[in-house]
Amino acid sequence: MNYLNTFLFQIYPYLALAVFAIGCWARFDLDPYTWRSGSSQMLSGKWMRFGSNWFHVGVLAILGGHFVGLLTPHWVYSPFISASSKQLLAMVAGGLFGVVCLVGMTVLLLRRLFNPRVRATGGGRDLLVLVLLYAQLCLGLSSIYISAGHLDGGQMILLGEWAQHIASFRGGAASYMVGAHWIFKAHVTLGMTLILIVPFTRLVHVWSMPIAYLRRPFQVVRRRQPAVDYTRR
């Protein structure tokens, strides 16, 4: 096993998670007014709702699928579904929501690049985040093609073992990534990089889920009444 593989898949994940946790805490404590998504909808609402909704629906479904699929031990689901069937399910669901996310992200990226008002008020980090997310999504969709070449579910089990070893702080996690296709390795590495840069970008708003809005009372809006002239008798 080479040193690069050991660093990327045994050491780098913990570095990324440490920067993520400490960086988010420090930013919230020291600079809370920058803790926001930086929405540009007021500058230009055209295509914003469509792109944002499709992107968020897709990315939340993908993240949920990755979380459950990678961190659930094989012995938990093996009595109900085989590894090959689980891989096929992941390919179909991941492909569907990946396309939804890709459409939304394409709209957001084109809007960021070609809308003068949005481009003028945005920063380099905003564009960098979109480009990295776009690249990560393309790698994920490309991995479906690679997975179609081995439907036995073996590679999925190895990826799950890697994630479970990292999550449980066990050694030897990098050994499960030695024989993985380079697309899987790039996908995992870029995913860790995105986690690492969260505290320094607008991605921090993933912590601030607006659950309270679901139980917030409706806003009461009253028609403005004409002013009363008390000088007239």
Image (cartoon, rainbow, N blue to C red):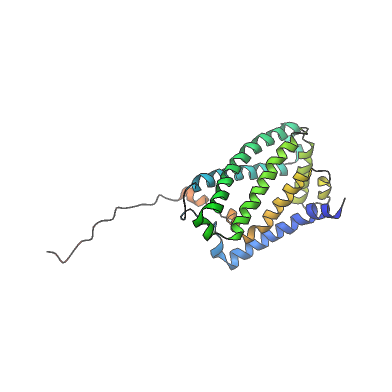
Q: Quadrant of residue 180?
A: top right
Instruction: Give the image location of residue 8, x and y in percent.
Output: 78, 54
Considering the image in quadrants, where does the C terminus appear? Answer: bottom left
> Residue at (78%, 39%) from the top-left corner?
155
Instruction: Give the image location of residue 10, x and y in percent.
Output: 80, 53
> Residue at (56%, 61%) from the top-left corner?
35
Instruction: Give the image location of residue 58, x and y in percent.
Output: 59, 42
Asked whether 149 or 83 is in front, the reply is 149
Q: Is residue 25 left or right of residue 13?
A: left
Question: Is residue 11 visible in the rendered structure shown here?
Answer: yes
Q: Is residue 180 left or right of residue 225?
A: right
Question: Is residue 79 visible in the rendered structure shown here?
Answer: no
Q: Is residue 44 above or below residue 142?
A: below
Asked whether 206 or 213 is in front, the reply is 206
Total numbered badges shown on the rendered structure: 0
> Residue at (75%, 41%) from the top-left corner?
73
Q: Quadrant of residue 29?
A: bottom right
Instruction: Give the image location of residue 152, x and y in percent.
Output: 78, 32
Asked whether 128 or 8 is in front, the reply is 128
Asked whether 211 or 12 is in front, the reply is 12
Residue lying farthest to the bottom in this orientation: 30
Residue lying farthest to the right in this orientation: 1
